[in-house]
Amino acid sequence: MKTQVKLSNVIPLLVGIVLSLFFLTPTAFAIGLLDQGLEQGEQAPIREGEKPVIPLDTKDPTYNIWHTLRDFSKDPKREPGPINIQKYDMGMAWSGIPTFFHLPVALTPEDLKAGKVEVAIMGAYTDMGSGMRGAAHGPNAFRNSEVYGGWGIVKTPNMHVMVDPLKELTVVDYGDAPNDMMSTERTIHAVRAFVHSAVAIEYEPGKHVMPIIIGGDHSLMYPDVAALVDVYGKGNVGVIHFDAHYDAGKYGFGHLINHGMPVYRLIEEGLVPGKNFIQVGLRGYYPDEESFKWMRENNFRYHTMADVERRGWDAVMNEVIAEAQDGPEYLFISFDIDVLDPAFVPGTGTPEPGGITPREAFPIVRRLCAESNVVGFELVELNPLVDPTYVSAMNANRIVRECLTGMAMRKMGLTDPHYLSPITEHHGQGKK
Ligand SMILES: [Mn+2]
């Protein structure tokens, strides 16, 4: 049987094709699918109109709203100093108004000064420098990271050394650094100023407030270290950098900062010399040989997991502690939570198997803070959106507690190499 093609059946089809061409072709051009005409392997050109970046609208009334302080003068009159915002002296871990470790808050540098605050813990919710967003929620996940026990309970010492850091030190929650959620480039200057506002305060003549920054992604290392350099001077601050990755990338899709580039920026701007960089925990499949050569040329001291595989953790830990004391007077610890194995920290944007364990990380952080002159600390890349069991937030909490414990030990003079409490080590018969 012969098929008759009726014109009336074909017309809608033809109209459809014509309309598709009419509407879809310009759309395809607009989104750049058809107009590149590139051969395979050919580099995409920088197009006219792309060279000058889209300017910012400084007339926009919301331009600086993200770092405009509210008018404190309208508050009820109060003396400057840390403010306890809890109703009760003590409570369960999951109760109360969330602040870092349920600590009092300081809203201004004057509050830090009046309270003789030694350590200011602050959030920084920058996460646009990371491919996987979510670290913006890190600071508040940390504030909620106590899972058992309580706060305000009379005695809560760290069992390894029997020192209670929150009783020995004056510590506050300094709130969050400002953040333009649309731009890392704009944000870093504001973070640098915010961190500096705390570090510039001396609680005793010559002794500056120690910042502990809870991120946020690792772009923060650049403004955090820069703020310390602003106080202590170029070349006077060394960085102990715990990370699965080297974070010294030179190229970032045209950007000069993202969470894989802060180390390169610090070196490039001469803020920290390469010899004052000590890296721990690098592993996996990044970076390449050329990047390691660049680090060698800049005299980095790096300890990959290959070091740990060959020589064991204790040997590497002892070497890092010795190296920390063989360098500049002031040290900053940059702790990327992804240095821990994903078994312990699934809640991070770039997990890398084969990492160190909490049991390895706790003593080295505690020892560095007790045995060397640590003046700042950051914990970054905590992403609670991929942390369904809270285990990452809990480990992050404990890393910072170990640092605070070490700081308290240093204040108390407990600075012997690998000090442990004689009452808790080896049924009370620990090394004296
Ligand atoms: Mn990192």
Image (cartoon, rainbow, N blue to C red):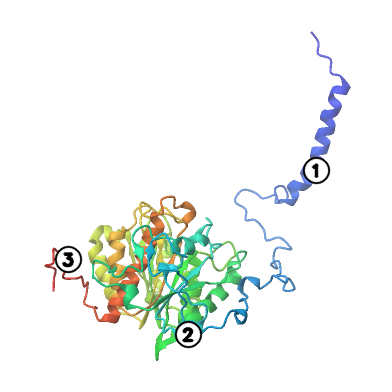
Picture disc at residue 23:
1
Residue visible at 22% across and 71% down in the picture: 418
Residue 266 position in % (x across, y down):
48, 75
Residue 51 position in % (x across, y down):
69, 66
Residue 280 appears in the picture as rendered: no
Disc number lying in front (3 or 2): 3
Residue visible at 45% across and 69% down in the picture: 87
Mark with earlier residue (3, 2)? 2
Residue 70 position in % (x across, y down):
62, 76
User: Looking at the picture, which amino acid does disc 1 mark?
Assistant: Phe
Tag 1's secondary structure?
helix
Using residue 352 as the reference point, say whether residue 249 is left or right of it: right
Badge 3: how crowded within 10 Å, few (<14), some, or many (20+)? some
Picture disc at residue 200:
2
Q: Which residue, given by chain and number where applicable, does mark 3 sit on?
A: 425
From this view, report whether residue 306 is shown above or below residue 177: above
User: Looking at the picture, which amino acid does disc 3 mark?
Assistant: Glu
Furthest residue toward left: 429
Question: Spatial distance from mark 1 to mark 2, Cα to Cα?
Answer: 60 Å
Using residue 358 as the reference point, say whether residue 346 is left or right of it: right
User: 40 and 179: which one is in front?
Assistant: 179
Residue visible at 41% across and 68% down in the picture: 88
Disc number lying in front (1 or 2): 2
Quadrant of image for the C terminus: bottom left
Question: Spatial distance from mark 3 to mark 1, Cα to Cα?
Answer: 76 Å
Quadrant of image for the N terminus: top right
